[in-house]
Image (spheres, rainbow, N blue to C red):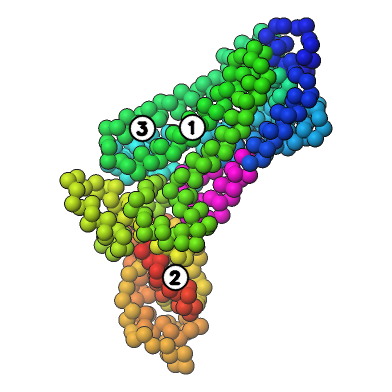
Amino acid sequence: DTLPPDTALLDRWSRMRTRPADSELVTYWGIWFLTAVVSGAANLFIIILIRAKPHLWNKPFNKYVVSLAFPDSVFSTCCAVTCGLHFMHGTWYGGTVHCDIQTVYAMFGVTASIWMNAVVARQIYRLADAAARQQEYAPPTSRDVMKHVLGVYTFAMVIALLPISTWPGPKANAGLGLACLPLEADMQSTILMWTLYLPCVLVVPVILVACYFFGAYRLLLRHQAMKDTRAVFIVFARLFFVLLFMWLPTGLCLWILGGVVPVSLAWAGGILSHVQGIFSVFLYIRKDDIRSELRSMFCSQGRRANDNNNKNSRVFPEDEGAQAASASARDGMPVPSSSSSFLRATASSSVLDYASLRVQAVEEMRLTERTPMLVVSYRDFVAHGSVPRSSDRLQRPLGEGDITVFVSHRWWGPLIHAPFRRASSFCDAASSYDWNGHVDTDKCHKFQILCRGLRKLAEKHGLDLEKLAIWMDFACIEQDIPELKLAGVESLLSY
């Protein structure tokens, strides 16, 4: 429902939907197509990278990165299709149906991005508050993150569908002939646009983000030692300001000053909106763990260089499982040489930031992982009847809800492989391999001690036995393949 460039209608609502000549629009659509393709591909790459790497996906803030990249990817990819079709046909293609589709994906992308920023800002405030109180930050679980994301996406889809419904507010239309967005059509729709629709899309989440970020910023100013929390704050604060200020020109040109500014200026604002997705990707890869993964993928010496220089990097204190790893470091596990040199250098300073130092040492240990951590469930461990060996294949990857018990033990017999000795007891017969002699006695004394100990541990701490998982070197590190065995041994610090 656009008007030709020579229309005699000069009211605000008519000027907002007056289009220029098709020859001018085709040029604009062609350039938008190119930027949208790059933005969509870049955001899709970030989503696939994080989802494909378990050590990245297991971190809650990386799940939030994916939830931010997804709306940008949807918007840019769909916009590339839309602009490409218009460009190829030399005019608007698809009529009203295509206009409705563009309004839905554009408003879903904008609303979901801004509201996800509000969710992330709240988590950053919680992180800063916990650090300021010197308390352990409890990151959101995967279920919590999923609830946040589904809630925001559902709300964003409702907002996106309103302009193509029968409600009396703003309706889907091609602003200045360029792109379809909710536009005012009369006084009633104007009132609803500025008192209800835009506040839900933009004003309320921006106020929430500002409050949370300001609160976190004040805490960070008051506690200068919280360098790791500051690193998280800076990454996501930059993301929000990029989103806000790169979409602001589009809002100004199409909604606030619609019909007053020239079409070329509104198109330039649209370019910024498309480039926002590209800028956001550059900010995502500034997050240390993502940057480290990219370096290891594209640079042959990337991971080694990162290990050697890690003392100059920052770590996000967000990781699930950080408490267990921190406890291991606190309880006397050896640290890599790079950590030791870092400790010596830092100890000479006048103020020793113990919490920051501990987190940094834990991250350096975590970087030594060469093969994923495997565990044996409590039920499988007990049912096996003896201390399992890796060749029994009871081990499985560490699960999200697992409560892991580490078993530190002495190998009670000589390190001898006796494949031809006959099974003399149930303990020997419990495994198809006769190699358990150096781990346990032939009466399964260690196995019995472990079973009793696990039950008492669960009883003492109120643990659910169904969620209990055991890590024990004999069962969880490959014993037969030298390369995998070495990888497991070199990963012990990270475990």
**Between disc 1 and disc 2, whose residue precedes?**
1
Coordinates of residue 323 in the picture (x, y in percent): 35, 52
Coordinates of residue 393 in the picture (x, y in percent): 52, 73
Majority secondary structure in the magenta region: helix
- Which residues are the magenta region? 39-66
Please report the residue visible at 56 percent of the width from the left and 34 percent of the height from the top.
Answer: 276
Q: Which residue is mark 3?
A: 216
Q: Quadrant of residue 232?
A: top left
**Do the residues under discs 2 and 3 have CB atoms within 8 angstroms?**
no
What type is the residue that disc 1 sits on?
Phe
Q: Quadrant of residue 161?
A: top right
Q: Which residue is mark 1?
A: 240
**C-alpha gap between disc 1 and disc 2:** 40 Å
Q: Which residue is mark 2?
A: 487
Whether residue 58 is visible to the viewer of this picture, yes or no, is no
**C-alpha gap between disc 2 and disc 3:** 41 Å
Instruction: Looking at the picture, tell me which residue is in the foreground, 352 or 377.
Output: 352
Secondary structure beneath disc 2?
helix
Secondary structure beneath disc 3?
helix
Instruction: Looking at the picture, tell me which residue is in the foreground, 293 or 22.
Output: 22
Whether residue 229 is visible to the viewer of this picture, yes or no, is yes
